[in-house]
Image (cartoon, rainbow, N blue to C red):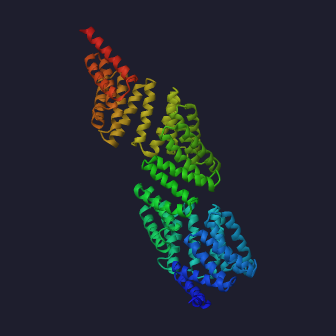
Amino acid sequence: QHYVINHLSIAESNHQLAEALSGNGNDKDSLAYYEAALSTYEKKLGAHKMTTEVLDALGKLHLSFGNLHVSHRYLERSLVLKRMLFGDENDTVVDTLHLIGKLQGKSGDIDDALGTLKEALRIRRSNQGMDSLPVAAIVNDVGVIHLRRDQHDIARTCFSEALRIWKDKLDKNHKYLGEVLLNLAEIDHYNGDLDDAIDKLTEALSVMKLNNGERHVSVALVYYKLGLSLTKKNEYVEAMDFLERSLLIRSAEYGDDSILVAEVLKSIGSLCLDGAEMAKARNYLGESLKIMLSKRPKDIETAECLYSLGKVMKKMKYIEEAKTYFEDALRIRMCRMENDDIAAAEIYTELATIYEEKQLHDESLKLHRKALEIRKSTMGEHASVGDSYHMIGTIEQTKNDLKAALSSFGAALVIYQNTRGDDHLTCAKTMNNIGIIYEATNECNEALKYHREALRIRKKNLGKDHLKVANSLDNIAGIYQRQHKVDKASSALKEALRIRIGKLGNDHLEVATTLFGMGIVYCDKGDFNRAMDCYEASLNIRKRKLGPTSLEVAQTLHNIGSLHALTQDYKSALSSWQSALEKYRTLLPDDHHMIACTIGNIQMAENVIADMS
């Protein structure tokens, strides 16, 4: 029995059967036969051409399965044997170098991959000329590496050169043409030419199906790429369909714990995150992360999965879990990349917002500034740099460091104007904040200038009846009120009220807030009847929406009491103030200034009533 199992003829049969299975797309089934053949070849033949062929085949299969460390062991053994048997410049050495270069690229060793592939290309061109089919295959993979380095023009040149050779020498439906279409589609996807990318992927899908069948892993890859491009186009239903098809094939071919299955799970999870399906997103990303941590715990793809899970947990309000995921993602990024990795800036920003929610302003600022420095060094004058300045300004404003906040908002505004144009809504948002700071520093004319410009931009982009237009009108009214221009203030508030009633209805809290502000303005004008109408309308809405004991109800009652006092109806004033005080005492600390103010008003009303009697 030992003799039969180890006989060369049995090994050759295993070898041939493995090749036949692999050729028919049954890659998983072929593994055992290749391994059986290799065992006999190594015992009977040692350093032999047949041994290297099987080592290459096993390395290639494990490479396609994503088992990169296993693949590397087989290919390195093959390369040593080949150089011993054939020398460094032999074509069969190039075959193995080519596979090792692809392996290095998938492992993230981009520079090593490029060096290996260029060495393989040099030998191949020397042996076979410039336009052979094997030369085109290596040129195509050199393009893949340049694509990974974001050198898209060089990558496109490589892909186009490979496509020229293949079109000249191969049938129009050859699988190599499908592969290069895939690569060109990836460039289109990155550049935002999504329709072109989808067209190329659709053509590649037809080629792959024709050559390999409906359920081949190459078809799964095209489905995966189509899912990504459709996701970027916000066509979520179609994207999900293609991603699920890819997952079905990869799970069947590679097993549920394959890194390539994890890749699809991560993309489906991210798609669910975009679609606000948080529970599904958590499940898919969690499954993906479990596989990645077991297979490639320190890879960039694992960091990406951790980052997406952090965003999911943050949206689900699991803040501590989100923080842990973001920190783990950052740790991997910092080990694998340079300090100017733009993805690290995104993580810093997410962590900064978590610290801000916790009111840890200094820690938040520190992280936002790290993100800003990365973005400035890698992106130059980019809108994302403006976003960093804006977030920094918001925290500085919260800390009441108004001078610093004004500087940050000013820097953001300049960048937004230069990158997005003077009339972009981000300019309006930033001008609004600048206006608020100028108002806080009593520079009302400057404040009014920025609020008016924000109003103009919002009307132009959103229409005159948008709620953000109403917000700008509120800000303008507030400044007019401080300047004692009560007619202009009431006009602005009337317009804001019209917009809010039209958009939100008569019974909304924002309508109540606007009515409350109008009551103050009418009171300043001496139009007490209209002021009372506004206060009472505001009070009725607030009672219905917030309950009779809310702080907003107490504030409205306090102002109604003050209005009664202005009309010398001190009994009504006393009743309103007493009702307000009762609510304040349940909602505010005993030393709060509104409690002291209301007590003072009540004593004054009681004294006046006593004097009158």
Residue 245: image quadrant is bottom left
In percent of the image, x 66 and y 81: which residue is there? 52
606 left or right of 332?
A: left
Specify the quadrant that holds the C terminus. Answer: top left
Residue 107 percent coordinates (x, y): 61, 65
Is residue 351 toward the left or the right of residue 565 in the image? right
Q: Is residue 365 in sight in this rendering? A: yes
In this rendering, would 313 be left or right of 595?
Answer: right
Q: Is 349 placed left or right of 376 in the picture?
A: left
> Relative to 335, is 80 above or below?
below
Q: Indicate whether 193 appears above or below 528.
A: below
282 or 546: nearer the viewer: 282
Q: Does the rendering let one see residue 191? A: no
Indicate the position of residue 518 as horizontal and vertical percent values: 36, 29
Residue 265, relative to residue 91: is it above or below?
Answer: above
Looking at the image, is 100 positioned above or below residue 25? above
Residue 73 rendering spot, x and y as whole percentages: 64, 72
Q: Position of residue 194 (x, y in %)?
A: 52, 63
Quadrant position of the N terminus in the picture: bottom right
Q: How many marks?
A: 0
Furthest toward the front, the residue is 1
Q: Residue at x 47, y 49 (%)?
A: 321
| Front residue of this view, candidates 566 and 109 | 109
- Determine the residue positioned at 51% across, 64% down: 263
